[in-house]
Amino acid sequence: MCSRSPDMMVSRAAITAVAALGLLSAACGPARAATTAHQLRVCADPNNLPFSNQAQQGFENKIAEVVARDLDAKLTYVWWAQRRGFVRNSLNQDKCDVLIGVPSSFEMVRTTVPYYRSTYVFVTRDDKHLKVASFDDPRLRKLRIGVQLIGDDATNTPPAHALSNRNIITNVRGYSVYGDYRQPNPPARLIDAVARGDVDVGVAWGPLAGYFAKRESVPLDVTPVSPQIDLPFLPFVFDISMGVRRGNDVLRDQLNAIIERRRGEIDRILQDYGVPRIDIGRAGPAS
Amino acid sequence: MARTRAVLPALKIGFTGSLLLAALAAACSRSKPADEVAQTPGRPAMTSVAGRSNGGAIASEAEDGQWVRPAKNYASTRFSGLNEITTANVQNLHLAWTFETGVLRGQEAAPLIVNNTMYIVTPFPNYLYALDLTKPGAPMKWVYKPGPIAAAQGVACCDVVNRGASYADGKIVYNTLDNQTVAVDAASGKEIWRTKVGEINLGESMTMAPLIVKNKVIVGNSGGEFGIRGWLTALDLGTGKLVWRAYHTGPDADVKIGARFKPFYADDRKPDLGVKTWPGETWKVGGAGVWGWISYDPQLNLIYYGSANPGPWNPEQRPGDNKWSSTLFARDPDNGEAVWAYQMSPHDLHDYDGVNENILLDLPVNGQTRKVLIHPDRNGYLYTIDRTNGEVLSADPFGYINTSSGVDLKTGRIKYIDEKEPKMGEVVRNACPAAPGAKDWQPSAFSPVTGLIYIPHQNLCQDVESVEANYIAGTPFVGMNVKMTPGPGGNRGFLDAWDPVARKLVWRIPENFPVWSGALVTAGNVTFYGTMEGWFKAVDAQTGKELWKFKTGSGIIGQPVSYRGPDNKQYIAILSGVGGWSGAVVAGNIDIRDSSAALGFVNAMNDLPNVTNKGGTLYVFSLP
């Protein structure tokens, strides 16, 4: 579901007095290297808080503002739902230049240095006093558990695999991360389900859980999962970077410098949005 | 690639003479084209040859020189009774005219020919063109633009294709990618009705061609990867109102399993298997849509079609048979009631949808004529099934298979090979056939003259392994890297001629790329198909000898059709325009460095952009 707002579409005409920024180091081909000069063209989901939305209320929107300010560039967006085809239809079509948040080992794009590391978390209602902290907690065999469901062939979210590896299957309910795109922030339905009591435990990606847990009508507990990695290789913690088109090393280098230079501002934004961090010893949402 | 061919006996012993005579009679009955064309076309006037003959295609509907159903006829033979073009003169075939659709995505539709007008449905944005065959160059009469919403492209799994339209009662009926079934006045191009039958925001889309049976338009949904719940739906041809809907997961009442349901195998006879063969409530998002073909037997009054793969959970997260995914259904078209069902791939492990075509034939089996359907499945077996009761009479490999070791005819169950089962964290190498199967949607053809089935298909295996983090905002995850590779022999596709009585390959033409186009066979004993390089080929239906070829502008993944023009000549038409799942690397501008893109298909197709480009052109051929 790619809702694209035509008025936000940026035309290639923007590539004008560009090649500025001393892109002499552009190794190959015509220099469409960095951003288009005074524009920072960000590819983002228009309906996916706490990451981004079209009203620019997400923490990735705020971080994009920091980057644009540092570059002294005008911030523009190309909106596209983040699912299969997102990178192909936005970044790789040269419609935009930057993804603000991708896993650092995401192979489809060139990634920057990481700027935060978060974790999957267990989300429970405080009033149930469950305090689940491990996939090996025997109570998980009985409790009703909600996980995000991706639905790409041959893969699913790490918590879904962690549970099925432990033969915890029949009490697991899937919430499509795509959801019903007519509703605001479809992935948040999982957190809603915990608050409503439809499931006892939700296992969600930290930033999503940290943000929405604070906005539900009942107090919710957010606890990082353990272990951090299921063997042979199923991690629940991920470093997050910005991403640019492969080959656009110039912009990647600029962004690396900005991440370093603006680390304090970025950390503050992540804290404001309740992103559980495990890279700076602040697990759990700021409350 | 050396061609492997066996000599074909001139006459199929298994086929009765009456069949051959009937076929020839049909073929030769092109003497009064004007009268025939003046008949009300498309009316389900099923004068079944089966009533007069002991064998062959049941639905040898009288040859009227038109093409009003997706598969030419209800039996889905894609056999044209026209015989002006023969093995002796096909080398003289020349380009008569062309038409540019202006839509450069995968062209999978069969053109329809009704009342001297040709109708073409394009991929998204799903234009419908009407071309006037009575005038030189077949000028456009009108174009209908349904205006599907752009966001629908985001839920199409594998290119934004459309597999075509159906005609009946003065209406052209087809589906748009954003789940609208539309009926358009065939004469004026004016919309008569449109019905929204699905919801893109829930992951549904539509790509299949409807079948019209007795005043009902029968359609189904796509989107198993997005957590849909698959269904088949009948709409009233006159009004577009929903008449019935049968789901493929859930309680028996939802699946329309009731008193009439008599599956052949005991495993299928328990109540509510659409719930009980899934953990928890996973059946609610269990996939099993319908994006392939529907056949119809007017005598038995049953429609036949297959459901798609289960989703969106991985196999280990949905223990059980996951009924009724990857299943063939026989249903009463009047009310949707299921009469029997047979699951080809219980608990599907490899994305083996069951949606491929079902060719309805009356065949001699062990000395008896049986009413069968022939179904070449993604899982690599060509099933011959008694279409009256769902008994599997045979299941023969037609491609290279190492994910299973056969089908147990006593229980009907496929025998999976455990080490080829994909599991998170484990590497599975060389699983064959790959996810698109030994054969995908591309429909086969059957000739009652040769008694052979012409099966276009692919020859692909795949490696599956975990890779680095993947990306959907809100859930980073470890992706699976699916890389498809050519199967044994190194070529990626075949056109096979298969003898359904002897149950063996008769001849085989290897092609470099998957043969992703449909097949057409004619009473002139010529078989037509296209290649992804763009060659449109005519071969001898008896021997497979190449007789003629023409290089079109783009790779071919469409369905060839044959019709009689107002000038009484036989024409062959094909849409050229590469795309689809296999051709997404070209149609979708996918970076060939993303070897796992298009669900791993790009790895096997990374040389396709070197040989073809996007296109969307109709080519029409005739003798001089």
Image (cartoon, rainbow, N blue to C red):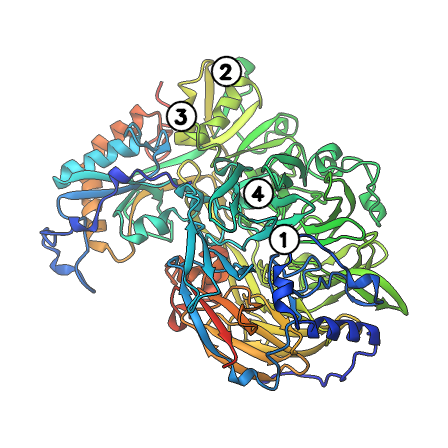
Q: Amino acid at mark 2?
A: Asp
Same chain shared by disc 4 and disc 3: no
Tag in front: 4 or 1 = 1
Judged from the image, the secondary structure of the residue bearing numbered disc 3 is helix
Q: Amino acid at mark 1?
A: Asp
Tag in front: 3 or 1 = 1
Q: What percent of the width, then of the height, locates residue B412? A: 80, 55
Sequence-earlier tag: 4 or 1: 4
| Residue B353 - label | 1
Q: Amino acid at mark 3?
A: Gly
Q: Is residue B234 above or below residue B437?
A: above
| Residue A126 - label | 2
Tag in front: 4 or 2 = 4
Q: Is residue B190 above or below residue B58?
A: above
- Is residue A200 found left or right of A50 in the rendered image? right
Tag in front: 4 or 3 = 4
Q: What percent of the width, then of the height, locates residue B523? A: 67, 75
Spatial distance from mark 4 to mark 3, Cα to Cα?
26 Å
Judged from the image, the secondary structure of the residue bearing numbered disc 4 is loop
Q: What chain does badge 3 belong to?
A: A
Callout 1: 10 Å neighbours few (<14), some, many (20+)?
A: many
Judged from the image, the secondary structure of the residue bearing numbered disc 2 is helix
Judged from the image, the secondary structure of the residue bearing numbered disc 1 is loop
Asked whether B232 or B230 is in front, the reply is B232
Tell me the residue that label 4 is attached to: B312
Tell me the residue that label 3 is attached to: A210
